[in-house]
Image (cartoon, helix red, strand yellow):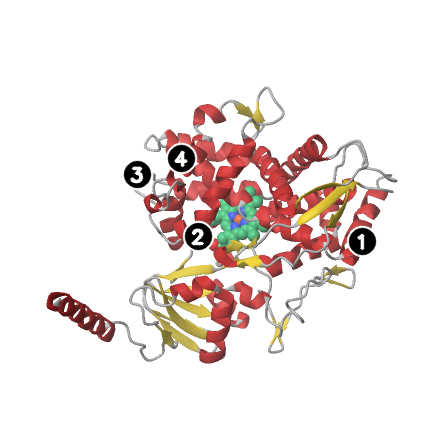
Amino acid sequence: MIAVALTSLIAFLLYLLTEWRGRKRQEGEPPLIKGWIPYIGKALEFGRDAHKFLTSYKEKYGDIFTVRIAGKYMTFIMDPVLYPNVIKHGRQLDFHEFSDQVAPVTFGYPPIRSAKFPGMDEEIQKSYRLLQGENLSSLTENMMGNLQLLFRQDYLGEEGEWRTGDMYRFCNQVMFEATFMTMYGKPTHSTRHAGMAALREKFEKFDAMFPLLIAQIPISLLGATKAIRDDLIHFFLPEKMSAWCGSSRFIQRRTEVFEQYDLLGDLDKAAHHFAILWASVGNTVPATFWATYYLATHPDALAAVRGELDRVLQLEGWESGPPPNITLTLEQLDSLLYLGSAISESLRLSSASMNIRVAQEDFTLRLERGRSITVRKGDVIALYPQSVHMDPDIFQDPEVYKFDRFVEDGREKTDFYKHGQKLKYYRMPFGSGSTKCPGRYFAVNEMKQFLSLLLLYFDVEVLEGQKKVALDSSRAGLGVLLPASEVRFRYRPRQP
Ligand code: HEM
């Protein structure tokens, strides 16, 4: 009994000593919030509701403060007027250090920036260009073909009866498979891959553990997650992929790059391809759901977006009923202003990705009007765009969905203000600066295509008597949030 009491006392004294000798705020540094739990600091509160947490600390400590979160000291810059000072700060603030540490452990491949794989990091970065520019049209064209194939084969019945379903599941089934086929191609002798439903279900299970993996919880502690990840990786083994045809230039180039490294095993190569599957559907599926949900629950928005789409197709000679083969060129997709705004608005309401940079040395971060803060080597500088997206000074009634918020005088609205200053960064679902999502143009196009086909092929209605769907904040900081519950809806072939 005495031994237990003594041990507890010593442990308590050690804790006090560590905390007393631990980090203290120094001259020039922002206010420091450590929390009372050693190492963990404020991680639990942050994890519960990051947006609420940061808003309340902003009220208390101002626009810049440092918080201890799971052993890291993170300095949050809350005022978007200051964002350009962080985003442009190249030399002392590294963009890739954090993802280089976390991604290999999460997806199961060896670290990229290593003497074993000279030049691979640069080649991988270069491959991202193949998601944009002239490759965007072939990606977009293939996606349209794949979406039409799936809608026709799985959903577009002959008879005009209403069919009911779960909206997230519907968006997930279509976008997951269509994106997969667009990225990785199809089996040589078939129009669709076998085992897609099982792959998607495993992916969902892995995705549910994603926040814990990013938090560096060892995969061995996460039950069946390791076995599930192994199955997902095996789907992309080189001998399987070599039997597929029509993959994107992006995936072809990455396959060529991996071939150049003898020390990269088949499973490692497969794990890299699996990571791209996560990047290409992990956010796009929930983003597509929110865009669909908001349109389906706002008839005025749905009518405006559909009217705009009909007008674009009428210019091509279309009159009514689903045309047999719908093509929408990149220019036509770009011209869908209200659809683009509706997608931006649903991303504003649902995206919660954190932008992270790691300080490479002790330095002074110069902000505006002579203001500056001192930053320590190894500290993280974080931007949390959800706070901007939900700022009532920038977006009037930020909780309200306004499908045309980003349209003004017949063009895209780009002027948003804070303290009377025009903002450079006001809408950031895709990150910022040099790590900005390389798939962003493709992502917006595929969402536009999905919604265009949905509105051309179907009438869609949310079933009555359901609560407004809330955001599930377990992925806060990591991308587009999932809905906290399913939505029952019904659809039928579009009536004239
Ligand atoms: C709505 C859909 C999407 C959202 C919201 C989204 C968002 C993001 C964000 C926030 C980042 C991190 C940026 C940063 O660190 O600052 C990112 C990175 C990335 N995204 Fe996306 N993304 C989407 C769709 C896609 C698609 C469709 C693809 C590919 C086909 C893709 C490929 C990537 C890749 C490869 C990276 C890593 C880039 C790097 O390491 O430098 N994303 N995305």
The answer to which of marks 1 and 2 sits earlier in the sequence is 2
The CA distance from mark 1 to mark 2 is 37 Å
> Image height check: is 329 above or below 78?
above
Question: Mark 2 — residue?
Answer: 211
Question: Mark 3 — residue?
Answer: 116
Q: Position of residue 475 (x, y in %)?
A: 49, 55
Classed neighbour count for the residue bearing mark 3: other residues with Cα under 10 Å, few (<14), some (14–19), many (≥20):
some
Question: Mark 1 — residue?
Answer: 303
The CA distance from mark 4 to mark 3 is 23 Å
Q: Position of residue 9 (x, y in %)?
A: 17, 71
Q: Position of residue 333 (x, y in %)?
A: 72, 46
The CA distance from mark 3 to mark 2 is 29 Å
The CA distance from mark 2 to mark 4 is 18 Å
Amino acid at circle 4: Asp
Q: Say left or right for 321 vs 375.
A: right
Residue contact between numbered discs 2 and 4, judged by CB atoms under 8 Å:
no
Nearer the observer, 229 or 407 = 229
Q: Quadrant of residue 152?
A: top right
Amino acid at circle 1: Ala
Q: Position of residue 132 (x, y in %)?
A: 59, 44
The answer to which of marks 3 and 2 sits earlier in the sequence is 3
Q: Say left or right for 168 vs 49.
A: right
Q: Say left or right for 406 vs 188.
A: right
